[in-house]
Image (cartoon, rainbow, N blue to C red):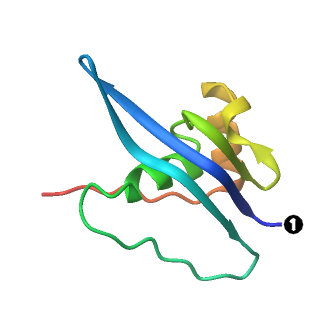
């Protein structure tokens, strides 16, 4: 079992009347004891992906499972509980 597993993962934001895709058709698996880095230019979807893995946001389509839990099925309260019990999260700020 993968700790994190994504299939055809997509996230689209609505800005006014325009759909802005942040992620399109992402597939990956992260196994236990792995070291993973998400690298790319600004606007490539790194923070969007981390926000979804951290249960702060839901995918627009596709599947994202963390510890065999489908993140899209978690409401805000369940997501906070899951994050508190299973995920370490350090928020990024800029000064």
Secondary structure of the residue carrying tag 1 is loop
- Above or below residue 59? Residue 75 is above
The residue furthest top is 17
Nearest the viewer among 44 and 93 is 44
| Disc 1 residue crowd, few under 14, some 14–19, many 20+, Cα 10 Å | few
Residue 37 is left or right of residue 84, and the answer is left
Q: Is residue 26 visible?
A: yes
**Circle count:** 1
Give the residue at mark 1.
1
Residue 83 is left or right of residue 39, and the answer is right
Q: Is residue 54 visible?
A: no
Q: Position of residue 43 (x, y in %)?
A: 27, 54
- Above or below residue 19? Residue 64 is below
Quadrant for the C terminus in the image = bottom left
Residue at x 63% of width, y 49% of height: 8
Residue at x 70% of width, y 61% of height: 4
| Quadrant in the picture for residue 46 | bottom left
| Quadrant in the picture for residue 59 | top right
Quadrant for the N terminus in the image = bottom right
């Amino acid at each position: 079992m993968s700790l994190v597993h994504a299939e055809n993962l997509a996230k689209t934001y609505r800005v006014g009347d325009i759909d802005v895709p942040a992620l399109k058709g992402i597939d990956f698996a992260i196994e236990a004891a792995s070291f993973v880095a998400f690298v790319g230019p600004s606007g490539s979807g790194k923070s969007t992906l981390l926000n979804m893995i951290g249960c702060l946001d839901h995918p627009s389509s596709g599947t994202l499972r963390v510890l065999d839990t489908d993140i899209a099925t978690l409401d805000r309260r369940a997501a906070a509980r899951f994050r508190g019990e299973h995920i370490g999260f350090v928020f990024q700020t800029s000064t």
